[in-house]
Amino acid sequence: MCSSDLVDITGSTALTREAEPVEFVQMLNRFFEVVVEEVESAGGLLNKFEGDAALCVFGAPAELPDPASAALRTARAIRDRVAAMGELEIGIGVAAGPVIAGQIGSASRLEYTVIGDAVNEAARLTELAKRADGRILASEATVLAASEDERAQWLRGRVLRLRGRETPTHSYRTASVGGPPSLARRISDVAKIVAE
């Protein structure tokens, strides 16, 4: 079993219009630095950057004794650190399940990746997490596979119908993050006022 976190920035399209390109790239680099530090400290692999998102894997290629707890704990740590920075809003989806892990591509270009329903489920949860309290949504399978201490950090959420999936996903969430609104939220609020 493997657990996946997909971490994505909320409102990045507006940020690219409103922020200077150099400023936006610097924000992205600070964001990715947090993601890399937290994933690696938990024994995970930052599999790839996808624009302003990151796919993080726990349990492949290196086995972990508890990949679900590592993924959930890392998601909370990333959320908290990014919120403390006050620059960006993010959404994180966490899912667990069987995946195919290995090299894919062509003879001239191979890339290590993970493919499977758990990765797709994490991506769909991320879309919804951007609007959810606490900014993280996890699948029930992930939370139930985690340690008792980690399960205590999560509250049962709604049953979700995720795009492209026939089976409903029972979701779990964390408590909201406090603190001042991020730069992304402030830009979004100003854009709404200007549009009115």
Image: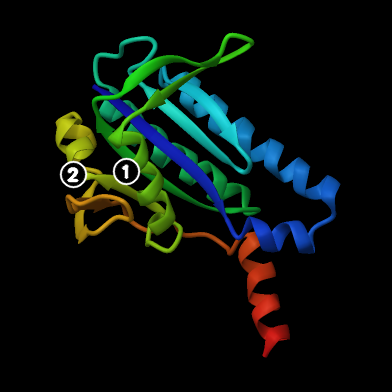
Residue 44: mark in rendering: none
The residue labelled by disc 1 is 121
Q: Pointers 2 and 1 in contact (CB under 8 A)?
A: no
Residue at image location 56% in from the left, 27% down from the top: 36
* Residue, far bottom: 196
Q: How far is mark 2 from mark 1, CA to CA?
A: 11 Å
Q: Give the structural element (helix, strand or loop) at label 1.
A: helix
Q: Residues within 10 Å of mark 1 (few under 14, many from 20)?
A: many
Q: Residues within 10 Å of mark 2 (few under 14, many from 20)?
A: many
Image coords of residue 104 (percent x, y): 48, 17
The residue labelled by disc 2 is 140
Residue at image location 69% in from the left, 63% down from the top: 14
Residue at image location 40% in from the left, 55% down from the top: 129
Image coords of residue 4 (percent x, y): 36, 32
Confirm whether residue 183 shows in the render.
no
Residue at image location 78% in from the left, 64% down from the top: 18
Q: Is residue 90 above or below residue 35?
A: below
Q: Is residue 107 left or right of residue 146?
A: right
Image coords of residue 46 (percent x, y): 51, 24
Three-letter residue code for mark 1: Glu
Image coords of residue 176 (percent x, y): 38, 58
Q: Is residue 90 left or right of residue 61?
A: right
Q: Quadrant of the rendered structure where residue 186 is? A: bottom right
Quick one: label 2 or label 1, which is nearer the N terminus? 1
Marks counted in the figure total: 2
Three-letter residue code for mark 2: Glu
Q: Nearer the viewer, mark 2 or mark 1?
A: 1
Quadrant including the N terminus: top left
